[in-house]
Image (cartoon, rainbow, N blue to C red):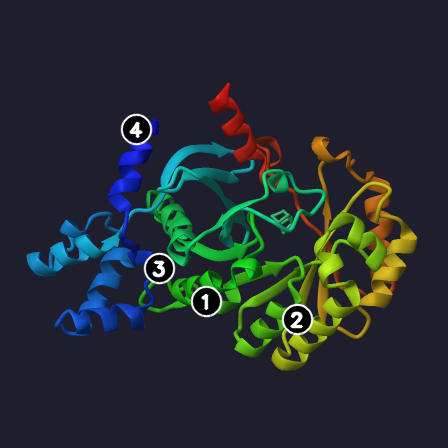
């Protein structure tokens, strides 16, 4: 296994992932190499529509260009280690990166289509206290191509059934805005009409509250959906759950969210995990309604599974419905998230932790 990893890493050394190249960048590279710009369209078609895995299969390119591409770029950056399928159809994939790290990607099947949840970092440095994937800290950022590859790999799976990826959510392991410089090309690539052509309104980025990047993202004025992992109605509770709140307190976060809405006029989704006895009482629902008053928004309540490593317990059914009712009575647009993949360790980070511990046993 180790030998294989070394071989793959050596092969990929010095090669840029082609999936990290935006269309205009590929055009510019081709121009430098004395090739006509329309080759970019052909290459994107091979990669994103025909989904070939080797440059030598790009049969309408000259042999010389195929060789040149192969000596500059890598095409396959992920290899599947394991896939788990839930009884509800949710699929979790564990992929290995060229340097041996592993990441996970989830495919959910909703009534409105196939939705892929991607990971943006190996680990995460934000240390939310309820998150199993924080235990090892941040290992590294993913490149744009490694994030694109997750969507493409899942699309390959769906090809077998003649289906397509309808939407993408950036809610896997990692804080997307902590990897902003790779996130933005990734978003442009999956949205590009010569690539995967996933509409901006079918893409959702979720942040735990990296305030400076929220301002930047607002100024991009995209049509991409925006979600904030809020999880607390007061700054005290939020600091307890999410250390990021100490760097950017709730008040500053809400300022940036209001700025985002002024700039884009787009509705915001607030993710609110319910943690038994911490933030799930009726008084908290009232505080939350006060906090988001005046914003065009939607609250997504997420009854969080027990996190054994962190001593968090699940909120009772009665408390979940009392919380929801309080928000509704206060005029808040609210839903309770339907659980998916409950039987396959759906909570973020769990699959990776489990596979790795089995490997080392
Ligand atoms: S919940 Fe998300 S942002 Fe928080 S530590 Fe886990 S991966 Fe990072």
Note whether ligand 1 is within 8 Å of mark 2.
no
Q: Nearer the viewer, mark 3 or mark 1?
A: 3
Q: Which residue is mark 1?
A: 199
State the residue position of label 4: 3
Contact between labelled residues 2 and 1, with CB atoms less than 8 Å apart = no
Rounded to the nearest whole Å, what is the CA distance between mark 4 and mark 2? 50 Å
- Cβ–Cβ below 8 Å for labels 2 and 3? no
Q: Earlier in the sequence, mark 4 or mark 1?
A: 4
Residue 206's image quarter? bottom right
Q: CA distance from mark 3 to mark 1?
A: 19 Å
Q: Are dots 3 and 4 in contact, CB under 8 Å?
A: no
The spot of residue 253 in percent (x, y) is: 73, 67
Within 10 Å of the Cα at label 2, are there few (<14), some (14-19), or many (20+) other Cα atoms? Answer: some
Residue 213, placed above or below residue 81 = below
Q: Position of residue 9 (x, y in %)?
A: 31, 41
Q: Which quadrant, please, contains the N terminus?
A: top left
């Amino acid at each position: 296994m180790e030998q294989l990893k070394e071989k793959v890493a050596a092969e990929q050394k010095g090669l840029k992932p082609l999936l990290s190249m935006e269309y205009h960048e590929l055009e510019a590279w081709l121009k430098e190499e004395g090739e006509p710009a329309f080759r970019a369209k052909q290459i994107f078609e091979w990669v994103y529509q025909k989904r070939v895995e080797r440059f030598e299969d790009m049969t309408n390119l000259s042999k010389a260009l195929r060789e040149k591409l192969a000596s500059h770029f890598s095409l396959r950056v992920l290899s599947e280690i394991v896939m788990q399928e839930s009884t509800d159809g949710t699929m979790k994939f564990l992929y290995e990166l060229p340097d041996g790290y592993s990441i996970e990607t989830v495919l959910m099947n909703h009534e409105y289509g196939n939705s892929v949840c991607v990971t943006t970092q190996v680990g995460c440095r934000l240390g939310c206290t309820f998150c199993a994937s924080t235990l090892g800290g941040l290992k590294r950022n993913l490149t744009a191509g490694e994030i694109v590859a997750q969507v493409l790999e899942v699309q390959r799976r769906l090809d077998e059934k003649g289906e397509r990826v309808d939407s993408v959510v950036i809610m896997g392991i990692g804080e997307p805005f902590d990897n902003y410089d790779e996130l933005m090309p990734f978003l442009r690539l999956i949205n590009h009409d010569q690539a995967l052509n996933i509409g901006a309104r079918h893409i959702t980025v979720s942040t735990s509250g990296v305030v400076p990047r929220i301002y930047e993202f607002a100024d991009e004025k995209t049509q991409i959906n925006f979600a904030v992992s809020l999880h607390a109605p007061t700054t005290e509770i939020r600091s307890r759950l999410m250390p990021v709140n100490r760097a950017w307190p709730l008040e500053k976060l809400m300022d940036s969210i209001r700025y985002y809405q002024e700039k884009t006029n787009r509705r915001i989704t607030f993710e609110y995990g319910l943690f038994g006895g911490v933030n799930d009482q009726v008084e908290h629902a009232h505080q939350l309604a006060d906090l988001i008053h005046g914003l065009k928004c939607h609250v997504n309540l997420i009854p969080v599974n027990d996190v054994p490593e962190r001593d968090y317990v699940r909120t009772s059914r009665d408390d979940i419905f009392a919380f929801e009712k309080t928000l509704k009575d206060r005029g808040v647009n609210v839903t309770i998230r339907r659980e998916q993949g409950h039987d396959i360790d759906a909570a973020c980070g769990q699959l990776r932790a489990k596979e790795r511990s089995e490997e080392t046993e």
